[in-house]
Amino acid sequence: MRIISGKFKGQRLIGPKNEAIRPTSDRIKESLFNIIQNEVREKKVLDLFAGTGNLGIEALSRGAKKVFFVEKGRRGIRIIQRNLTQCGMAGQSEIIHKDVSRAIGILQNRGESFDIIFIDPPYGKGLIQKTLQKLNTQRIHKEDSILVIQHDRREPLSEKIEGWKLINQRRIGDTLLSFLRASGEKK
């Protein structure tokens, strides 16, 4: 696991020692950032189900203004902290040690709003739909925000997603990367 591009290109990141955390592979991460590369600079990013912090750290390396990492697992929190410290990025980030649903509520109460939101939940647990519903009831995104969902190909997204429009989708092995833009409309 390494940083693909930007200020810290080539920097190795600390990964999990067991399979409880599934970090995004370099191949998937590179594809994801090739698609949104012009959207990252000076943006505020939210990394939900952050795991190792791999996606948010890549965004910081590529010029994101600030990244909020949401992770409920203690192992993940320790890995994110170590990776941010190792790269000197702690000052551009905030780690929220909570369940995603609770964290979204906290962020809304604080008046936070994000340009890019990454969702990479554990596969096959129905967390994508639950998270999308939470994002629609507790709005923490802007009119033109981008939502990037990493999910198993056997767990496809619905054609109609309230408040979001599917703008791109890529399949890499068994993984789908779905890119959505806030539509501003309620259905």
Image (spheres, rainbow, N blue to C red):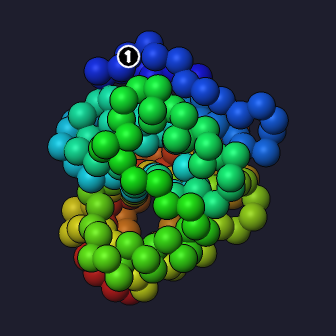
Q: Quadrant of residue 65?
A: top left
Horizontal arrangement in the rendering, residue 132 relative to residue 99 (left or right): left
Asked if 80 appears above or below 9 in the picture, the reply is below
The one of 105 and 127 positioned closer to us in this rendering: 105
The one of 55 and 87 positioned closer to us in this rendering: 87
Residue at image position (51%, 32%) is: 83
Q: Which residue is mark 1?
A: 9
Residue at image position (30%, 22%) is: 6
The one of 170 and 151 positioned closer to us in this rendering: 151
Amino acid type, label 1: Lys
Asked if 179 appears above or below 145 in the picture, the reply is above
Q: Quadrant of residue 33?
A: top left
Asked whether residue 20 appears in the rendered view, the answer is: yes
Residue density around tag 1, few if under 14, some if 14–19, many if 20 or more, within 10 Å: few
The one of 167 and 148 positioned closer to us in this rendering: 148
Residue 84 image point, x, y percent: 45, 35
Residue 59 image point, x, y percent: 35, 37
Horizontal arrangement in the rendering, residue 183 relative to residue 75 (left or right): left
